[in-house]
Image (cartoon, rainbow, N blue to C red):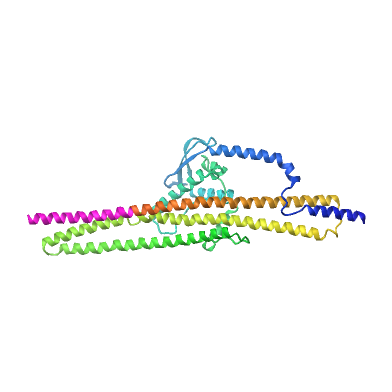
């Protein structure tokens, strides 16, 4: 009986030191302290190395090449690379990459860098474009993507960047989590994943992201309607020009015919001017709006990765508490040997370390998302201001040319009138 009391006392003492909030696991930390210090030093040296590395990459126009005798073709891009990375073949060289390579690189970077907003690899746009416009827009988007990942202080250090820029084929495979991302993109409105967390700041940020996404979708519809109305507006010039042309052919007074001819010429010049600027002034706004909708989808991926980490952390916490409560309830019924107590302690130590790691991962991705959001807001404001300014500049340029056409017409008419009076 005294032996049982002694073992029960040992168990009680063991339970007293177990807690989900326990900050140290000395049995594990003592063993790994040396390895951790060594790893930290290696990481520091690696970061210092990549801080000095720079890349300047340009994506050239899409090209095609024949693959076999059946004349099947494959599209690819030539990348001009300028770098000081000694791990790459040269300081300046050219490689070829398929659009699929860019997509895999994007997915791997998402997998390796949770919480970082990565410019998406855009295959197509939500608004109507010609094939030539799509190819040009995609090329510009790929340049933005490569510019971001090669200048971002964290992304440019990812080992997959060197593999992508090597002169060998890019043979990396899609990460397993890509299936989750594809499923996610099939959700209606690319919704945020649900979780049990009730952080008011995070909830407000998600609400703002949803609101911004809906506003941009509305803006795209408005701009598309504007483009359609402009097409209709330009087509009315055809009717006006045809009417004046028919009047010229009639046997009316020559002076009237001469005036009608001049007016027709003015209409033709205005039509040509309108057609030239038909999409040019709002094209940048269309592109940037659609790109930001897809950027917001990428941001939602980051928030959803955070939600998954939180849910996993909470599940582990519940598992820890359940095991602890079960052990506490049955402490008076069990007769533990020393080896059994030792194995239980190891089990709880490992579980507690797992909890700490998950909490650290969750806090790290939360901090990363907050920093990325600040940069995102700054970049969003700058890019939209630039697009709107360009829109207004092109609009003024178009209207000024229209005014000059009318001024030229009236100057000629005034000179004609003066000559007739003399």
**Residue 211, percent from left and from top:** 49, 61
From the viewer's perspective, is residue 57 above or below residue 21?
A: above
Identity of the residue drawn at 23% across and 55% down:
405
Q: Is residue 414 magenta?
A: yes
**Residue 417, percent from left and from top:** 11, 57
Q: Is residue 213 left or right of residue 250?
A: right
Nearest to the observer: residue 323 or residue 145? 323
Dominant secondary structure of the residues highlighted in magenta in the image: helix
Identity of the residue drawn at 60% across and 62% down:
194
From the viewer's perspective, is residue 352 above or below residue 86?
A: below
From the viewer's perspective, is residue 54 above or below residue 226?
A: above
Image quadrant in which you'd find residue 126: bottom left
Name the residue furthest left.
422
Q: Please say whether residue 257 is visible from this viewpoint.
A: yes
**Residue 130, percent from left and from top:** 39, 56
Image quarter where the C terminus lies is bottom left
**Residue 311, percent from left and from top:** 64, 58
Query: The magenta stretch spans which residues?
Result: 394-422
Name the residue furthest right.
1
Q: Is residue 408 magenta?
A: yes
Image quadrant in which you'd find residue 402: bottom left
Nearest to the observer: residue 334 or residue 247? 334
Q: Is residue 192 left or right of residue 277?
A: right
Nearest to the observer: residue 326 or residue 90? 326
Q: Please say whether residue 131 is visible from this viewpoint.
A: no
Q: Is residue 278 left or right of residue 381?
A: left
Image quarter where the N terminus lies is bottom right
Question: How many circles with numbers are drawn on the protein?
Answer: 0
Identity of the residue drawn at 41% across and 46% down:
61
Identity of the residue drawn at 31% across and 63% down:
232
């Amino acid at each position: 009986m005294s032996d049982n009391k002694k073992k029960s006392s040992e168990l009680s003492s063991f339970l007293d030191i177990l807690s989900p909030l326990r900050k140290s696991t000395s049995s594990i930390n003592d063993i790994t302290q040396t390895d951790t210090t060594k790893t930290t030093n290696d990481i520091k040296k690696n970061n210092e190395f990549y801080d000095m590395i720079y890349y300047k990459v340009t994506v050239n126009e899409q090209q095609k090449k024949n693959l076999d005798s059946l004349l099947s073709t494959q599209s690819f891009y030539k990348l001009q690379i300028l770098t000081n990375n000694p791990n790459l073949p040269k300081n300046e060289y050219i490689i070829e990459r398929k659009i699929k390579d860019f997509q895999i690189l994007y997915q791997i970077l998402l997998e390796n860098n949770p919480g970082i907003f990565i410019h998406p690899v855009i295959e197509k746009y939500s608004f109507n474009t010609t094939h030539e416009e799509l190819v040009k827009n995609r090329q510009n988007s790929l340049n933005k993507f490569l510019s971001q990942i090669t200048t971002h202080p964290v992304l440019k250090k990812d080992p997959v960047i060197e593999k992508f820029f090597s002169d060998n084929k890019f043979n990396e495979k899609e990460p397993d989590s890509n299936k989750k991302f594809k499923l996610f993109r099939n959700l209606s409105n690319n919704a945020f994943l649900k979780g049990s967390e009730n952080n008011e700041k995070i909830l407000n940020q998600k609400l703002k992201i949803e609101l911004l996404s809906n506003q941009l979708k509305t803006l795209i519809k408005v701009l598309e309607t504007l483009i359609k109305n402009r097409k209709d507006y330009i087509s009315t010039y055809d009717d006006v020009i045809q009417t004046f042309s028919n009047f010229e052919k009639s046997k009316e007074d020559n002076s009237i015919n001469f005036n009608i001819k001049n007016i027709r010429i003015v209409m033709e010049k205005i039509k040509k001017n309108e057609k030239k600027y038909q999409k040019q002034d709002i094209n940048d706004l269309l592109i940037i709006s659609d790109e930001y909708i897809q950027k917001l989808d990428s941001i939602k991926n980051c928030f959803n990765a955070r939600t998954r980490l939180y849910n996993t952390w909470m599940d582990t916490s519940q598992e820890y508490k359940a095991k602890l409560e079960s052990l506490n309830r049955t402490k008076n019924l069990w007769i533990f040997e020393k080896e059994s107590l030792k194995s239980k302690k190891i089990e709880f130590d490992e579980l507690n370390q797992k909890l700490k790691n998950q909490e650290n991962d969750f806090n790290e991705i939360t901090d990363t998302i907050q920093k990325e959001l600040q940069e995102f807001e700054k970049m969003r404001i700058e890019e939209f201001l630039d697009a709107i300014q360009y829109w207004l500049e092109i609009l003024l340029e178009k209207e000024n040319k229209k005014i000059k056409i009318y001024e030229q017409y009236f100057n000629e008419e005034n000179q004609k009138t003066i000559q007739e009076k003399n």
